[in-house]
Amino acid sequence: MGKSYERIEGRLRAFIEAQHIFFTATAPLDGDGTINLSPKGLNGSFAVIDELTVAYLDFAGSNAETIAHLRENGRITLMWCAFEGPPNIVRVHGRGEPVFRDDARWNELMQHFPDIDPTAHGLRAIIVVTAESIRDTCGYAVPFMAYDEDRSLHASRFARETDESLDAYFQKKDHIATSIDGLPGLPLPLPPLPRTATHDR
């Protein structure tokens, strides 16, 4: 029914990369803190870096719970479900780190996302996850659901923002610089996108 893997490779990697949506789960160390579960979409915004490392792009939104939890304790689980084809659920349990715009690794990491225009979605961080446990389970109860296309709403909302206006947007939100539980979230003011990672506006 279920199997553990030492690496993300072969059919396992192909399955992960073929999915149009995945989910991330994080939590603070405080047992009374808020557990966070987020869906992640947009084709091209997830990448397998190597057999034990994956990364995804963290775009503008009204919260920064994942970033806050990772800054505090690094724990994260990623999950993919088969909504088409043979049933399957894959989970990667590991340690995550948010890489911000002013990090020296930014431009190198962005090379793994060639199909994404970083200016179109208010890109604020790259989440890098090192796998500690890789497992799959049957997924027999997961329903069939068809993928039509990515929504255009996120890009249409944030593509018009400059670095300055995006920072102002984040400054106005209650749970960007700090999490719901008061943990440090996205560091502000927001640094500009590095030039080599920026498309012409």
Image: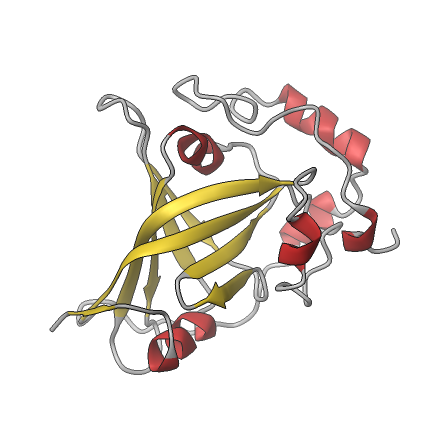
Instruction: Tell me if residue 145 comes above or below residue 73 in the rendering.
Output: below
Looking at the image, which is closer to me, 111 or 35? 111
Q: Position of residue 73 (x, y in %)?
A: 36, 32
Taking the image as shown, residue 92 lies to the left or right of residue 190, namely: left
Q: Residue furthest left?
A: 1
> What count of labels does the image hold?
0
The residue lying at 51 percent from left, 27 percent from top is 185
The residue lying at 27 percent from left, 82 percent from top is 86
Taking the image as shown, residue 53 lies to the left or right of residue 137, namely: right
The image's colouring method is secondary structure
Instruction: Tell me if residue 182 comes above or below residue 90 in the rendering.
Output: above
Q: Position of residue 83 (x, y in %)?
A: 34, 72
The residue lying at 65 percent from left, 40 percent from top is 103
Q: Position of residue 80 (x, y in %)?
A: 35, 63
Q: Residue furthest top?
A: 182
Instruction: Tell me if residue 162 comes above or below residue 173 in the rendering.
Output: below
Q: Residue furthest right?
A: 200
The residue lying at 80 percent from left, 52 percent from top is 198
Q: Position of residue 61 (x, y in %)?
A: 58, 38
